[in-house]
Amino acid sequence: MTAHRGMVLIMAMVFLLVMSLLISAMLLVTQLSHKAAYAGQQQLQTTQEALAQHSAALNTLSEVAIASRRTMTTCPASYAAWSGGAIQCEVVQVDTAAYSDSKLFYAGYSSLVLKTMLIQEPD
Amino acid sequence: MLKHWLTFIMLSAASSSGYSCDLNNPIAVTATLPSLSDDGPARKVSLSNNVQLDIPDAEGVLKIHSADSSVLLDQLTNWPTETGHISSIKAQPVVLDQNYDGIADAVYAIDTSGHLWFIPLSSRGFARPELVADFSTMAAEFRQPLQLVHTLAPVGSGQLQRQTMLLIIASMAEGGDTLLVVRHLQQRAMVQLGDLTDRTYLSHAETAAGIAEQLWQQIQLGAGWYVQMNKRITAVPQVYAGVVYLSSAEVAAVQPDCSLAEHTELQIHALHLHHAGAVYARRHWQITALDHGQLVLQKNLHGELELSLQHGQQQHRVHADLLAITPDCANCVTALTADQFPRLSTLATFQAEQGGH
């Protein structure tokens, strides 16, 4: 009788162990799935944020985003061309970057922008 | 009465001396040449012609001096002609930077007879000159400064091709000046006046409805165009947004310093860079100002762009409501306004992503 009770106890404990393992595995899988899904979404969000940030920097050509600038001796050819002394051109490199919340993902954009300015005496 | 006679005699003397009004800048043209060693810094040099070398009546010569030390680096006295010589070079040459790297690749020079030369430059100085055009049959004097414009020009099939355009002024003692616009293509044979389209007069049809498609196609395939002003050009032609602006006056009324005799009307010309047609309602108009000076693009007190004549501190408005040509069609134009500047155009964008979750 005592031996039977021992077996039942062991089986119950094995059953509980198997169940707890199953539940732990299910929980882990659920978390991983959630994390994987969220990672993709956050990556897209970061990329989108970086693109928006870059577009804004290109429109304003803010000094913060300018990585380098080089003044050209001659402006590039155009259909509506200009005399040499009338306009001045410079090639500006604009760099922007965005990081995800976890700082583990980075999205960066770099553009070369031609800036054409009028050369004129102040009135 | 005596004063009037004296004025008349002075004007006659100025006009009979022929080619009055020198538009050249007295300062020599500067350029940047590559270093003699592979890793050395680029060198600033100056290019002198016969006038700057103070030998205006000698045979044509160009010299390169170091801009810092004035040391002679190279000279061009032997030209690929039968005699090895050319006429004096009095017109200011222009420097070509073909690949926009800030280093001069070639220089264009024209002698007084009308031979236009393309002279490649290297770290050692001048390479062998190539004759681009020969306008000696015009029997004119070519002493006014050359102008160079980098353009994208249509080439018949609707495509735009990068070209170098040169604005040249030919002066005749009594016939006035002629503006020639020459397209330089490396593979093209030597250009002569007959290769350029005569755009001195516009037909009534063109005046009313713009350039005809057939003529436009013909000009696109040609080597350029010319317009006989029958007047003396009094300011260096300026190209603003594809429009060539210049001023002119009666030959006899232009003084050696390019100022005008009293009661002389100044004529302003605005020509389409690619076909010399009208951009505004008229191709030229008179202005009442008895003034002279350089044509400049100015922003006025209201922030609008306008074309002015500037002489020292004096300014006179020539034209407001400026236009720019567009490649959509031969006669297409759009407004040129100050708020379009600075103009930003994105050449390339690179994207980089790194890491993961």
Image (cartoon, rainbow, N blue to C red):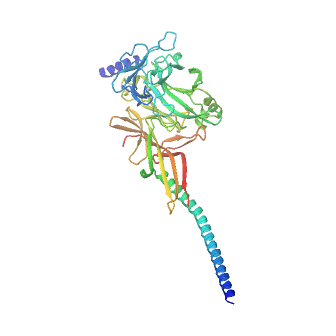
Give the quadrant of residue B317.
Answer: top left
From this viewpoint, is residue A32 visible? Answer: yes
A25 or B219: nearer the viewer: A25
From this viewpoint, is residue A123 visible? Answer: no
Taking the view exactly as shown, the residue that stands out farthest to the left is B2
Residue at 52%, 29% in the rendered image: B165
Up the image or down, B160 lies above or below B184; here it is below
Taking the view exactly as shown, the residue that stands out farthest to the top is B83
Q: Quadrant of the image for the N terminus of chain B?
A: top left
Q: Position of residue B313 (x, y in %)?
A: 32, 37
Q: Is residue A78 left or right of residue B45?
A: right
B243 or B353: nearer the viewer: B353
B267 or A1: nearer the viewer: A1
Up the image or down, B325 lies above or below A66; here it is above
Please state the total of marks drawn on the protein image: 0
Q: Position of residue B33 (x, y in %)?
A: 43, 27
Q: Position of residue B25 (x, y in %)?
A: 38, 27
Q: Position of residue B276 (x, y in %)?
A: 55, 32
Residue at 58%, 60% in the rendered image: A44
Give the quadrant of residue B192.
Answer: top right
Residue at 45%, 51% in the rendered image: A65
Q: Quadrant of the image for the C terminus of chain B?
A: bottom right
A8 or B107: nearer the viewer: A8
